[in-house]
Structures are given as structure tokens and as C-alpha cells.
């Protein structure tokens, strides 16, 4: 009974990290409209960033003092969001990215994930509580939910926009707008 509860609890925590609209989902969406592979690789890059952040939080859980660094986390995150937003707009009229979806796509998502204040703060709050609860089963449930999201979300977007260039372009523009909006929000939080 405890095993099932821990697994479901971990699964719910995983969805609390992945489903809310944010910079990472905006990047996944913008890439998935052109290439299912790029969308999924971006999602797996985000998941890798979560794994790195989770391991850091778990390993340093007794030493974490968010208050000392939170302002810089927001400012660095805002700068990265602006860079990614500009890149999305520059590539909005470009041909589909299928052939170039590879390590670069994956590594850019890791960079965004490791500098995304939402992911960092989630791991320093809910993730830190998760680390105190411990348990491999919670960890497995959490990452199982992330895997489900990073595969189904880009797949649904890719199918929904395939053969609809206006819709695909609108998703990319909305994704860029979200990046800029989150950047502005992070700057306000840093002030």
C-alpha cells in the first residue's frame, strides 16, 4: 500500500513540475511544431536538467540557502529567457528543424533548465521537501511523470500543427512571447 502511495505521490509531484506553463514548455512547443524529434529531445534535455538539479538539491539539502542567491537566479534566468525568445523569433520563418535536432537541441534544453528560475525554485522548495521524504519509489514516480509529459506534449503539438503553418507560427510566436514575459517577471522578482 505504501509503495503505491509513494509512486502516485511521486507521479503527482512530477506533473506539478512539468505541466504548468513556463519557459521550458514554451521551448518544447516551439520546437515540436517543426519537428517531433526536436520537441522530444528538448523535453529530455529539460528532464536531464531536473535530474541534475534534483541530485544537487538532494546532495546539498542541509546546506541550501535560497535567500542568499535567489536574486541572481532570477536575473540569470531572465537573461537566458531573452536569448531563447530572440532565437525563437529569428527562426520563426525558417524551415523545419528535423535534420538538426540532435545534441545541440538537447544541450540547449539542459542549459535552459539549469538556468530556469521556475525549475530551480521548484527543486529548492517542493524538490527539497521531496528529498527529505526520500525514497527511491518517489523518485521513480516523479521521473516517470516527466517522461510521460516530455513525450506526449510534443507529440500532441506536432500532430495538432502538422500541415497548419499558421498555427505552427502562432505557437512559435506565443512561445517567444512567453519567454519575454517570464524574463520580465523574473526581473521584477529580482528587484
Image (cartoon, rainbow, N blue to C red):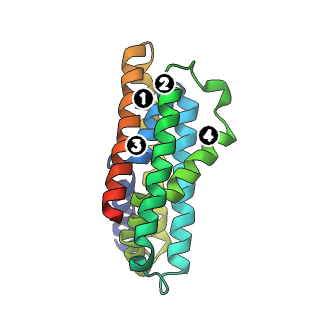
Measure the C-alpha gap from mark 3 to mark 4: 17 Å
Measure the C-alpha gap from mark 4 to mark 1: 16 Å
Q: Which residue is mark 1?
A: 172
Q: Which residue is mark 3?
A: 179
Using the image as rendered, state which of residue 35 and residue 146 is in the foreground: 35
Residue at the (55%, 73%) spot, across then down: 56
- Describe the element under mark 1 as helix, strand or loop: helix
Q: Identify the image quadrant of residue 42.
A: top right
Measure the C-alpha gap from mark 4 to mark 2: 16 Å
Q: Which residue is mark 2?
A: 92
Mark closest to the chain's N terminus, 3 or 1: 1
Percent position (x, y) of residue 54? 51, 68
User: Mark 3 packing: few (<14 Cα in 10 Å), some, or many (20+)?
Assistant: many
Q: Is residue 83 above or below residue 140?
A: above
Mark closest to the chain's N terminus, 4 or 2: 2
Using the image as rendered, state which of residue 182 and residue 22 is in the foreground: 182
Q: Are marks 4 and 2 in contact (CB under 8 Å)?
A: no
Percent position (x, y) of residue 75? 44, 60
Percent position (x, y) of residue 129? 37, 76
Q: Is residue 44 above or below residue 14?
A: above
User: Mark 2 packing: few (<14 Cα in 10 Å), some, or many (20+)?
Assistant: some
Q: Identify the image quadrant of residue 12.
A: bottom left
Mark closest to the chain's N terminus, 1 or 2: 2
Mark closest to the chain's N terminus, 3 or 4: 4
Q: Are marks 3 and 4 in contact (CB under 8 Å)?
A: no
Q: Which quarter of the image is occupied by the N terminus? A: bottom left
Amino acid at each position: 500500500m505504501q509503495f503505491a502511495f509513494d509512486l502516485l505521490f511521486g507521479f503527482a509531484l512530477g506533473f506539478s513540475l512539468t505541466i504548468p506553463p513556463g519557459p521550458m514548455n514554451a521551448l518544447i512547443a516551439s520546437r515540436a511544431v517543426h519537428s517531433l524529434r526536436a520537441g522530444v529531445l528538448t523535453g529530455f534535455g529539460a528532464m536531464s536538467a531536473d535530474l541534475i538539479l534534483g541530485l544537487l538539491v538532494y546532495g546539498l539539502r542541509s546546506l541550501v540557502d535560497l535567500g542568499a542567491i535567489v536574486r541572481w537566479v532570477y536575473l540569470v534566468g531572465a537573461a537566458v529567457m531573452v536569448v531563447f525568445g530572440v532565437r525563437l523569433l529569428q527562426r520563426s520563418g525558417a524551415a523545419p528543424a528535423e535534420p538538426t535536432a540532435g545534441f545541440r537541441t538537447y544541450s540547449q534544453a539542459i542549459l535552459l533548465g539549469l538556468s530556469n528560475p521556475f525549475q530551480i525554485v521548484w527543486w529548492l522548495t517542493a524538490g527539497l521537501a521531496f528529498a527529505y521524504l526520500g525514497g527511491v519509489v518517489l523518485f521513480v514516480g516523479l521521473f516517470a511523470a516527466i517522461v510521460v509529459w516530455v513525450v506526449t506534449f510534443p507529440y500532441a503539438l506536432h500532430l495538432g500543427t502538422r500541415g497548419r503553418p499558421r498555427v505552427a507560427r502562432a505557437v512559435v510566436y506565443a512561445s517567444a512571447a512567453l519567454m519575454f514575459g517570464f524574463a520580465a517577471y523574473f526581473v521584477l522578482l529580482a528587484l
